[in-house]
Image (tube, rainbow, N blue to C red):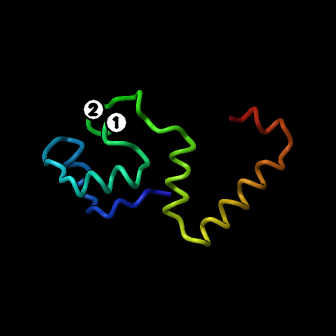
Amino acid sequence: MPISVDLQRAIYGQIERGDITVSLIALDKIVTSTGSNIDYIVYGNQDNFPTVRKRINTLLDLSSEDELIMYYKCISAIRECPSKNKQLL
């Protein structure tokens, strides 16, 4: 499922190529939607990159009630699988 940042599709490539400067509002949308932080996006600082749990929490915070129910069912089903499925991780 792609993360929606509410920016026009053409803008993504322009940002990646450095053709345009990102406004603070757009940067905030990108950071909030991806669960990243400003240091990582701007400077590539891996030390401050959020943990998986923080990224999951961000995803959950942005989800509807129906999506939350679906996530719960999926996670519950995965946890009930035999331990051999852990080898897939």
Q: Are marks 1 and 2 in contact (CB under 8 Å)?
A: yes
- Seen in the picture, residue 69 relative to 51 is either above or below; the reply is below
Q: Position of residue 54 (x, y in %)?
A: 52, 45
For the C terminus, which image quadrant?
A: top right
How far is the residue under mark 1 from the one under mark 2? 5 Å
> Residue 13 in the image: x percent, y percent?
24, 49
**65 relative position to 11: left or right:** right
Q: Is residue 6 above or below residue 58?
A: below
Q: Nearer the viewer, residue 89 or 37?
A: 37
Amino acid type, residue under disc 2 in the picture: Tyr
The disc placed on residue 2 is none
Residue drawn at the location 83% of the way across and 47% of the way down: 81
Q: Residue at x 13, y 48 (%)?
A: 20
Q: Residue at label 2?
A: 43
What's the residue type where badge 1 is placed?
Tyr
Q: Residues within 10 Å of mark 1 (few under 14, many from 20)?
A: some
- Secondary element under disc 1, as helix, strand or loop, is helix
Q: Residue at x 34, y 29 (%)?
A: 45
Q: Position of residue 27 (x, y in %)?
A: 26, 51
For residue 85, side relative to residue 10 (left or right): right
> How many numbered marks have been drawn onto this rendered protein structure?
2
- Percent position (x, y) of residue 51? 52, 38
Q: Is residue 66 above or below residue 54?
A: below
Give the left or right position of residue 60, taking residue 87 as reference. Answer: left
Q: What is the residue that sits farthest to the right in this orientation?
A: 82
Residue under the image location 43 percent in, 35 percent down: 49
| Label 2: element kind | helix
Please name the residue that numbered disc 1 is placed on: 40
Q: Quadrant of residue 85?
A: top right
Sort mark 2 into few (<14), some (14-19) or many (20+) by Cα contacts within 10 Å: few
